[in-house]
Image (cartoon, grey):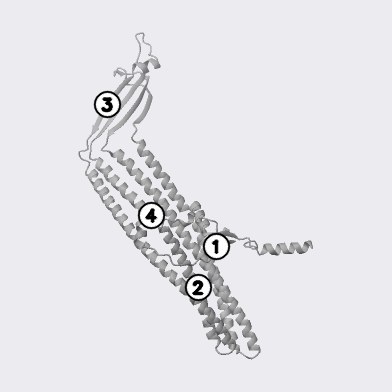
Protein backbone atom coordinates (compact mmCIF):
# COMPACT_ATOMS: atom_id res chain seq x y z
CA UNK A 1 0.00 0.00 0.00
CA UNK A 2 2.86 2.37 0.78
CA UNK A 3 4.48 1.80 -2.64
CA UNK A 4 1.20 2.56 -4.38
CA UNK A 5 0.88 5.86 -2.48
CA UNK A 6 4.43 6.79 -3.46
CA UNK A 7 3.66 6.12 -7.13
CA UNK A 8 0.49 8.24 -6.93
CA UNK A 9 2.35 11.13 -5.24
CA UNK A 10 5.17 11.07 -7.80
CA UNK A 11 2.69 10.98 -10.66
CA UNK A 12 0.81 13.94 -9.19
CA UNK A 13 3.98 16.01 -8.79
CA UNK A 14 5.10 15.27 -12.32
CA UNK A 15 1.94 16.88 -13.65
CA UNK A 16 2.43 20.08 -11.64
CA UNK A 17 3.38 23.05 -13.89
CA UNK A 18 7.14 23.35 -14.24
CA UNK A 19 7.91 20.47 -11.85
CA UNK A 20 8.83 17.81 -14.34
CA UNK A 21 11.16 20.00 -16.34
CA UNK A 22 12.36 22.18 -13.47
CA UNK A 23 11.39 25.25 -15.46
CA UNK A 24 11.49 28.72 -13.97
CA UNK A 25 8.71 31.09 -14.94
CA UNK A 26 9.65 34.56 -16.26
CA UNK A 27 6.92 37.12 -16.82
CA UNK A 28 7.37 40.22 -18.97
CA UNK A 29 7.47 42.46 -15.87
CA UNK A 30 10.12 40.27 -14.25
CA UNK A 31 12.31 40.38 -17.38
CA UNK A 32 12.05 44.17 -17.69
CA UNK A 33 12.80 44.84 -14.04
CA UNK A 34 15.78 42.49 -14.15
CA UNK A 35 17.08 44.31 -17.23
CA UNK A 36 16.66 47.73 -15.62
CA UNK A 37 18.76 46.55 -12.70
CA UNK A 38 21.50 44.70 -14.60
CA UNK A 39 21.69 46.14 -18.13
CA UNK A 40 25.14 47.67 -18.69
CA UNK A 41 23.91 50.54 -20.88
CA UNK A 42 21.50 51.58 -18.14
CA UNK A 43 24.38 51.64 -15.67
CA UNK A 44 26.24 54.04 -18.00
CA UNK A 45 23.31 56.48 -17.81
CA UNK A 46 23.25 56.20 -14.04
CA UNK A 47 26.96 57.06 -13.92
CA UNK A 48 26.34 60.04 -16.21
CA UNK A 49 23.68 61.30 -13.82
CA UNK A 50 26.11 60.99 -10.90
CA UNK A 51 28.73 62.98 -12.83
CA UNK A 52 26.15 65.69 -13.60
CA UNK A 53 25.26 65.83 -9.90
CA UNK A 54 28.91 66.42 -9.04
CA UNK A 55 29.10 69.24 -11.62
CA UNK A 56 25.95 70.86 -10.21
CA UNK A 57 27.32 70.79 -6.67
CA UNK A 58 30.71 72.10 -7.79
CA UNK A 59 29.12 75.08 -9.56
CA UNK A 60 27.73 76.18 -6.19
CA UNK A 61 31.05 75.68 -4.41
CA UNK A 62 32.66 77.96 -7.00
CA UNK A 63 30.92 80.93 -5.33
CA UNK A 64 33.07 80.46 -2.23
CA UNK A 65 36.42 82.27 -1.92
CA UNK A 66 39.55 80.35 -2.80
CA UNK A 67 42.13 79.83 -0.07
CA UNK A 68 45.72 78.72 -0.62
CA UNK A 69 48.87 78.33 1.45
CA UNK A 70 52.47 78.03 0.34
CA UNK A 71 55.84 77.56 1.99
CA UNK A 72 59.34 77.47 0.59
CA UNK A 73 62.78 76.89 2.08
CA UNK A 74 66.25 77.04 0.60
CA UNK A 75 69.95 77.07 1.33
CA UNK A 76 72.02 79.69 -0.48
CA UNK A 77 75.78 79.51 -0.87
CA UNK A 78 78.36 81.31 -2.95
CA UNK A 79 77.68 84.80 -4.23
CA UNK A 80 73.96 85.63 -3.65
CA UNK A 81 71.55 88.33 -2.47
CA UNK A 82 70.71 88.50 1.23
CA UNK A 83 66.85 88.47 1.27
CA UNK A 84 66.94 90.33 4.58
CA UNK A 85 69.11 93.31 3.53
CA UNK A 86 69.27 92.89 -0.26
CA UNK A 87 73.08 93.11 0.04
CA UNK A 88 75.43 90.97 -2.04
CA UNK A 89 76.97 88.36 0.27
CA UNK A 90 79.35 85.50 -0.28
CA UNK A 91 78.47 83.18 2.57
CA UNK A 92 76.09 80.28 3.12
CA UNK A 93 72.70 80.93 4.77
CA UNK A 94 69.21 79.36 5.15
CA UNK A 95 65.89 81.12 4.49
CA UNK A 96 62.22 80.22 4.63
CA UNK A 97 59.10 82.08 3.42
CA UNK A 98 55.40 81.33 4.07
CA UNK A 99 52.20 82.70 2.57
CA UNK A 100 48.46 82.33 3.20
CA UNK A 101 46.22 83.95 0.57
CA UNK A 102 42.52 84.24 -0.26
CA UNK A 103 40.65 85.49 -3.31
CA UNK A 104 36.95 86.19 -3.85
CA UNK A 105 35.26 86.94 -7.17
CA UNK A 106 32.92 89.86 -6.50
CA UNK A 107 31.64 90.31 -10.04
CA UNK A 108 32.19 88.29 -13.25
CA UNK A 109 29.26 89.30 -15.40
CA UNK A 110 27.01 86.81 -13.52
CA UNK A 111 29.00 83.96 -15.05
CA UNK A 112 29.07 81.88 -11.85
CA UNK A 113 25.32 82.29 -11.25
CA UNK A 114 24.58 81.26 -14.82
CA UNK A 115 26.90 78.29 -14.48
CA UNK A 116 24.89 77.13 -11.47
CA UNK A 117 21.71 77.30 -13.54
CA UNK A 118 23.45 75.63 -16.49
CA UNK A 119 24.64 72.72 -14.32
CA UNK A 120 21.18 72.40 -12.83
CA UNK A 121 19.56 72.03 -16.26
CA UNK A 122 22.27 69.61 -17.42
CA UNK A 123 21.57 67.49 -14.34
CA UNK A 124 17.85 67.60 -15.13
CA UNK A 125 18.58 66.55 -18.71
CA UNK A 126 20.77 63.67 -17.48
CA UNK A 127 17.96 62.46 -15.20
CA UNK A 128 15.41 62.53 -18.03
CA UNK A 129 17.88 60.83 -20.39
CA UNK A 130 18.22 58.04 -17.84
CA UNK A 131 14.43 57.72 -17.61
CA UNK A 132 14.17 57.76 -21.41
CA UNK A 133 16.74 54.99 -21.68
CA UNK A 134 14.78 53.02 -19.08
CA UNK A 135 11.69 53.35 -21.28
CA UNK A 136 13.64 52.41 -24.42
CA UNK A 137 15.14 49.42 -22.64
CA UNK A 138 11.72 48.34 -21.35
CA UNK A 139 10.24 48.43 -24.85
CA UNK A 140 13.28 46.68 -26.30
CA UNK A 141 12.78 43.86 -23.79
CA UNK A 142 9.05 43.94 -24.57
CA UNK A 143 9.65 43.45 -28.30
CA UNK A 144 12.20 40.67 -27.77
CA UNK A 145 10.00 38.99 -25.16
CA UNK A 146 7.09 38.89 -27.59
CA UNK A 147 9.44 37.55 -30.27
CA UNK A 148 10.14 34.68 -27.89
CA UNK A 149 6.41 34.18 -27.32
CA UNK A 150 5.82 34.27 -31.07
CA UNK A 151 8.37 31.57 -31.80
CA UNK A 152 7.09 29.52 -28.89
CA UNK A 153 3.74 29.65 -30.67
CA UNK A 154 5.36 28.83 -33.99
CA UNK A 155 7.01 25.79 -32.41
CA UNK A 156 3.59 24.67 -31.11
CA UNK A 157 2.01 25.16 -34.55
CA UNK A 158 4.87 23.27 -36.19
CA UNK A 159 4.46 20.39 -33.74
CA UNK A 160 0.72 20.34 -34.33
CA UNK A 161 1.25 20.23 -38.11
CA UNK A 162 3.88 17.51 -37.72
CA UNK A 163 1.45 15.49 -35.61
CA UNK A 164 -1.28 15.88 -38.25
CA UNK A 165 1.15 14.81 -40.97
CA UNK A 166 2.20 11.80 -38.93
CA UNK A 167 -1.42 10.74 -38.45
CA UNK A 168 -2.17 11.27 -42.14
CA UNK A 169 0.90 9.23 -43.05
CA UNK A 170 -0.25 6.33 -40.88
CA UNK A 171 -3.77 6.46 -42.31
CA UNK A 172 -2.37 6.61 -45.84
CA UNK A 173 -0.34 3.47 -45.19
CA UNK A 174 -3.51 1.66 -44.11
CA UNK A 175 -5.47 2.89 -47.12
CA UNK A 176 -2.67 1.83 -49.48
CA UNK A 177 -2.53 -1.64 -47.93
CA UNK A 178 -6.28 -2.00 -48.49
CA UNK A 179 -5.91 -0.76 -52.07
CA UNK A 180 -7.97 2.40 -51.54
CA UNK A 181 -5.06 4.78 -52.27
CA UNK A 182 -2.12 4.82 -54.63
CA UNK A 183 1.49 4.52 -53.44
CA UNK A 184 2.18 8.00 -54.87
CA UNK A 185 0.05 9.46 -52.05
CA UNK A 186 2.37 7.86 -49.52
CA UNK A 187 5.41 9.44 -51.14
CA UNK A 188 3.76 12.86 -51.12
CA UNK A 189 2.79 12.58 -47.47
CA UNK A 190 6.25 11.31 -46.54
CA UNK A 191 7.80 14.36 -48.22
CA UNK A 192 5.40 16.67 -46.37
CA UNK A 193 6.20 14.93 -43.09
CA UNK A 194 9.95 15.47 -43.58
CA UNK A 195 9.37 19.09 -44.57
CA UNK A 196 7.43 19.77 -41.40
CA UNK A 197 10.14 18.16 -39.29
CA UNK A 198 12.47 20.74 -40.85
CA UNK A 199 9.97 23.53 -40.10
CA UNK A 200 9.88 22.46 -36.46
CA UNK A 201 13.68 22.40 -36.27
CA UNK A 202 13.91 25.89 -37.80
CA UNK A 203 11.26 27.27 -35.42
CA UNK A 204 13.11 25.80 -32.43
CA UNK A 205 16.37 27.36 -33.63
CA UNK A 206 14.74 30.78 -34.00
CA UNK A 207 13.24 30.39 -30.53
CA UNK A 208 16.67 29.75 -29.01
CA UNK A 209 18.06 32.72 -30.93
CA UNK A 210 15.38 35.04 -29.51
CA UNK A 211 15.97 33.68 -26.01
CA UNK A 212 19.66 34.46 -26.31
CA UNK A 213 18.86 37.97 -27.59
CA UNK A 214 16.56 38.51 -24.63
CA UNK A 215 19.25 37.26 -22.23
CA UNK A 216 21.73 39.71 -23.75
CA UNK A 217 19.36 42.66 -23.26
CA UNK A 218 18.82 41.61 -19.64
CA UNK A 219 22.53 40.90 -19.05
CA UNK A 220 21.54 37.43 -17.89
CA UNK A 221 23.80 34.40 -18.55
CA UNK A 222 22.47 32.57 -21.59
CA UNK A 223 22.64 29.22 -19.82
CA UNK A 224 19.99 30.48 -17.39
CA UNK A 225 17.40 30.51 -20.18
CA UNK A 226 17.72 26.86 -21.09
CA UNK A 227 15.08 25.85 -18.55
CA UNK A 228 12.86 28.93 -18.65
CA UNK A 229 9.14 29.17 -19.29
CA UNK A 230 7.74 32.48 -20.55
CA UNK A 231 4.22 33.51 -19.64
CA UNK A 232 1.77 35.09 -22.05
CA UNK A 233 -1.85 34.00 -21.73
CA UNK A 234 -4.65 34.71 -24.14
CA UNK A 235 -5.80 38.35 -23.84
CA UNK A 236 -9.26 39.17 -22.61
CA UNK A 237 -10.66 40.45 -25.90
CA UNK A 238 -13.34 43.08 -25.48
CA UNK A 239 -14.18 46.21 -27.33
CA UNK A 240 -11.29 47.95 -29.03
CA UNK A 241 -10.46 50.94 -26.78
CA UNK A 242 -11.18 54.27 -28.43
CA UNK A 243 -8.37 56.81 -28.31
CA UNK A 244 -8.41 60.52 -29.15
CA UNK A 245 -4.88 60.99 -30.41
CA UNK A 246 -4.65 64.79 -30.09
CA UNK A 247 -5.77 64.89 -26.46
CA UNK A 248 -3.55 61.91 -25.66
CA UNK A 249 -0.57 63.74 -27.18
CA UNK A 250 -1.35 66.89 -25.19
CA UNK A 251 -1.17 64.92 -21.93
CA UNK A 252 1.80 62.77 -22.94
CA UNK A 253 4.17 65.64 -23.77
CA UNK A 254 3.81 66.88 -20.20
CA UNK A 255 5.66 63.83 -18.86
CA UNK A 256 7.50 62.48 -21.93
CA UNK A 257 11.16 61.94 -20.93
CA UNK A 258 12.30 62.68 -24.49
CA UNK A 259 10.56 66.08 -24.48
CA UNK A 260 11.58 66.85 -20.90
CA UNK A 261 15.22 66.08 -21.67
CA UNK A 262 15.14 68.26 -24.81
CA UNK A 263 13.54 71.11 -22.85
CA UNK A 264 16.25 70.89 -20.20
CA UNK A 265 18.94 70.92 -22.90
CA UNK A 266 17.34 74.04 -24.42
CA UNK A 267 17.32 75.80 -21.03
CA UNK A 268 20.95 74.81 -20.48
CA UNK A 269 21.83 76.21 -23.91
CA UNK A 270 20.21 79.53 -22.97
CA UNK A 271 22.34 79.67 -19.84
CA UNK A 272 25.41 78.87 -21.90
CA UNK A 273 24.62 81.95 -24.02
CA UNK A 274 24.42 84.01 -20.82
CA UNK A 275 27.78 82.61 -19.68
CA UNK A 276 29.38 83.63 -22.99
CA UNK A 277 27.81 87.08 -22.75
CA UNK A 278 29.27 87.52 -19.27
CA UNK A 279 32.79 87.38 -20.69
CA UNK A 280 32.21 90.83 -22.26
CA UNK A 281 31.94 92.41 -18.80
CA UNK A 282 34.83 93.33 -16.48
CA UNK A 283 35.55 91.10 -13.50
CA UNK A 284 36.32 92.30 -9.97
CA UNK A 285 38.19 90.25 -7.35
CA UNK A 286 39.02 90.87 -3.69
CA UNK A 287 42.40 89.56 -2.55
CA UNK A 288 43.97 89.15 0.89
CA UNK A 289 47.18 87.53 2.07
CA UNK A 290 49.48 87.06 5.08
CA UNK A 291 53.22 86.67 4.48
CA UNK A 292 56.12 85.89 6.80
CA UNK A 293 59.55 84.34 6.66
CA UNK A 294 62.74 83.28 8.40
CA UNK A 295 66.23 84.39 7.35
CA UNK A 296 69.38 82.99 8.88
CA UNK A 297 71.14 86.34 8.18
CA UNK A 298 68.67 88.24 10.36
CA UNK A 299 70.67 88.80 13.57
CA UNK A 300 70.25 90.81 16.77
CA UNK A 301 72.64 93.41 18.19
CA UNK A 302 74.85 90.67 19.65
CA UNK A 303 75.23 88.99 16.22
CA UNK A 304 73.07 86.00 17.06
CA UNK A 305 70.46 84.74 14.58
CA UNK A 306 66.97 85.68 15.73
CA UNK A 307 64.87 82.62 16.61
CA UNK A 308 62.47 81.06 14.10
CA UNK A 309 59.36 81.91 16.15
CA UNK A 310 60.35 85.53 16.67
CA UNK A 311 61.10 86.01 13.00
CA UNK A 312 57.73 84.59 11.97
CA UNK A 313 56.09 87.22 14.19
CA UNK A 314 58.45 90.06 13.30
CA UNK A 315 58.44 89.48 9.54
CA UNK A 316 54.66 89.05 9.22
CA UNK A 317 52.87 91.32 6.75
CA UNK A 318 49.24 91.59 5.68
CA UNK A 319 47.70 92.61 2.38
CA UNK A 320 44.13 93.45 1.36
CA UNK A 321 43.30 94.68 -2.11
CA UNK A 322 41.00 94.55 -5.10
CA UNK A 323 41.66 93.96 -8.78
CA UNK A 324 39.62 94.60 -11.88
CA UNK A 325 40.12 92.96 -15.27
CA UNK A 326 38.60 94.57 -18.35
CA UNK A 327 38.42 92.58 -21.57
CA UNK A 328 39.56 94.71 -24.49
CA UNK A 329 40.68 92.43 -27.28
CA UNK A 330 41.13 88.64 -27.28
CA UNK A 331 41.53 87.98 -30.99
CA UNK A 332 37.72 87.84 -31.38
CA UNK A 333 37.56 84.61 -29.34
CA UNK A 334 34.89 85.81 -26.90
CA UNK A 335 32.64 87.05 -29.70
CA UNK A 336 33.05 83.76 -31.59
CA UNK A 337 32.20 81.75 -28.48
CA UNK A 338 29.09 83.88 -27.95
CA UNK A 339 27.92 83.38 -31.54
CA UNK A 340 28.51 79.63 -31.32
CA UNK A 341 26.52 79.50 -28.08
CA UNK A 342 23.62 81.28 -29.81
CA UNK A 343 23.74 78.75 -32.64
CA UNK A 344 23.77 75.88 -30.12
CA UNK A 345 20.65 77.35 -28.52
CA UNK A 346 18.92 77.52 -31.91
CA UNK A 347 19.92 73.92 -32.59
CA UNK A 348 18.51 72.81 -29.23
CA UNK A 349 15.24 74.65 -29.95
CA UNK A 350 14.98 73.02 -33.38
CA UNK A 351 15.77 69.62 -31.92
CA UNK A 352 13.01 70.07 -29.35
CA UNK A 353 10.48 70.83 -32.07
CA UNK A 354 11.76 67.85 -34.05
CA UNK A 355 11.22 65.57 -31.04
CA UNK A 356 7.71 66.93 -30.54
CA UNK A 357 6.87 66.30 -34.18
CA UNK A 358 8.34 62.79 -34.08
CA UNK A 359 6.46 61.90 -30.90
CA UNK A 360 3.22 63.29 -32.33
CA UNK A 361 3.31 61.22 -35.52
CA UNK A 362 4.53 58.12 -33.69
CA UNK A 363 1.58 58.45 -31.34
CA UNK A 364 -0.85 58.89 -34.24
CA UNK A 365 0.55 55.87 -36.03
CA UNK A 366 0.52 53.65 -32.94
CA UNK A 367 -3.10 54.55 -32.21
CA UNK A 368 -4.00 53.81 -35.83
CA UNK A 369 -2.14 50.49 -35.77
CA UNK A 370 -3.84 49.47 -32.52
CA UNK A 371 -7.27 49.92 -34.12
CA UNK A 372 -6.21 48.10 -37.30
CA UNK A 373 -4.53 45.22 -35.48
CA UNK A 374 -7.61 44.65 -33.35
CA UNK A 375 -9.73 44.20 -36.47
CA UNK A 376 -7.03 41.99 -37.98
CA UNK A 377 -6.89 39.84 -34.85
CA UNK A 378 -10.66 39.31 -34.86
CA UNK A 379 -10.66 38.49 -38.56
CA UNK A 380 -7.75 36.04 -38.33
CA UNK A 381 -9.62 34.25 -35.54
CA UNK A 382 -12.58 33.77 -37.87
CA UNK A 383 -10.19 32.64 -40.60
CA UNK A 384 -8.66 29.97 -38.35
CA UNK A 385 -12.12 28.65 -37.41
CA UNK A 386 -13.06 28.46 -41.10
CA UNK A 387 -9.78 26.76 -42.08
CA UNK A 388 -10.12 24.21 -39.27
CA UNK A 389 -13.57 23.27 -40.53
CA UNK A 390 -12.29 23.21 -44.11
CA UNK A 391 -9.49 20.85 -43.12
CA UNK A 392 -11.88 18.46 -41.40
CA UNK A 393 -14.08 18.42 -44.50
CA UNK A 394 -11.09 17.98 -46.81
CA UNK A 395 -9.77 15.10 -44.70
CA UNK A 396 -13.09 13.24 -44.99
CA UNK A 397 -13.20 13.88 -48.73
CA UNK A 398 -9.68 12.52 -49.09
CA UNK A 399 -10.57 9.35 -47.22
CA UNK A 400 -13.61 8.97 -49.48
CA UNK A 401 -11.47 9.52 -52.57
CA UNK A 402 -13.15 12.78 -53.59
CA UNK A 403 -9.92 14.84 -53.54
CA UNK A 404 -6.27 13.95 -53.99
CA UNK A 405 -3.41 14.35 -51.54
CA UNK A 406 -2.24 17.63 -53.11
CA UNK A 407 -5.57 19.30 -52.33
CA UNK A 408 -5.51 17.94 -48.77
CA UNK A 409 -2.00 19.30 -48.18
CA UNK A 410 -3.03 22.72 -49.56
CA UNK A 411 -5.92 22.96 -47.06
CA UNK A 412 -3.62 21.82 -44.24
CA UNK A 413 -0.95 24.41 -45.13
CA UNK A 414 -3.58 27.13 -45.28
CA UNK A 415 -4.65 26.21 -41.75
CA UNK A 416 -1.06 26.51 -40.51
CA UNK A 417 -0.70 29.90 -42.20
CA UNK A 418 -3.93 31.17 -40.63
CA UNK A 419 -2.83 30.05 -37.16
CA UNK A 420 0.50 31.84 -37.65
CA UNK A 421 -1.26 35.04 -38.80
CA UNK A 422 -3.61 34.97 -35.81
CA UNK A 423 -0.69 34.54 -33.40
CA UNK A 424 1.22 37.41 -35.00
CA UNK A 425 -1.82 39.74 -35.05
CA UNK A 426 -2.60 38.94 -31.42
CA UNK A 427 0.93 39.66 -30.17
CA UNK A 428 1.26 42.86 -32.23
CA UNK A 429 -2.08 44.07 -30.90
CA UNK A 430 -1.00 43.40 -27.31
CA UNK A 431 2.21 45.37 -27.93
CA UNK A 432 0.24 48.34 -29.30
CA UNK A 433 -2.08 48.22 -26.28
CA UNK A 434 0.92 48.58 -23.99
CA UNK A 435 2.36 51.37 -26.13
CA UNK A 436 -0.89 53.35 -25.94
CA UNK A 437 -1.05 52.71 -22.18
CA UNK A 438 2.46 54.15 -21.95
CA UNK A 439 1.25 57.29 -23.75
CA UNK A 440 -1.41 57.55 -21.04
CA UNK A 441 1.32 57.58 -18.39
CA UNK A 442 0.98 53.90 -17.43
CA UNK A 443 4.42 52.29 -17.08
CA UNK A 444 3.14 48.71 -17.30
CA UNK A 445 6.36 47.17 -15.96
CA UNK A 446 5.99 49.08 -12.66
CA UNK A 447 2.55 47.70 -11.86
Helix, strand or loop under label 1? loop
Q: Can you tell which mark lies on residue 102?
A: none
Residue 53 placement (x, y as % from top left): 40, 43
Front position in the image: 318 or 35: 35
Q: Nearer the viewer, mark 2 or mark 4?
A: 4
In this view, which residue lies farthest toward the right?
1
Q: Residue at x 34, y 49 (%)?
A: 264
Front position in the image: 69 or 249: 249
Circle 3 residue: 321
- Position above or below: 101 against 328: above
Q: CA distance from mark 4 to mark 3?
A: 52 Å
Q: Can you tell which mark lies on residue 420?
A: 2
Q: Nearer the viewer, mark 3 or mark 2?
A: 2
Q: Residue at x 49, y 72 (%)?
A: 422
Q: Can you tell which mark lies on residue 256?
A: 4
Q: Of label 2 and label 1, which has the lower sequence position?
A: 1
Helix, strand or loop under label 2? helix
- Position above or below: 333 against 209: above
Residue 446 placement (x, y as % from top left): 48, 54
Quadrant, the N terminus: bottom right
Q: Is residue 417 visible in the rendered structure shown here?
A: no
Give left or right: position of 154 versus 119. right
Amino acid sequence: MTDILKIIMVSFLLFLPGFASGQESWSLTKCINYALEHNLSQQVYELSEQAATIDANQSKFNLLPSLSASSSAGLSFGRSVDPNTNDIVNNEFFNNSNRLGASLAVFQGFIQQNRIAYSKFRLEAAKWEKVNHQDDLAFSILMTYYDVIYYQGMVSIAREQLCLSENNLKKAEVLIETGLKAKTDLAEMQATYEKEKLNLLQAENRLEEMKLKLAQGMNLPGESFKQVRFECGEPAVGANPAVVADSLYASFVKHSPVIKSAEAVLQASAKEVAISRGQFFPSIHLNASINTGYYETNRDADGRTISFRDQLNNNRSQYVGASISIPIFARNQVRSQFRKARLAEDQARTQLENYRQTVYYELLNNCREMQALFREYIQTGKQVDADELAYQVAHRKYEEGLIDVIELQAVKNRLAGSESQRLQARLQWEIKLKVVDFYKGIRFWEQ
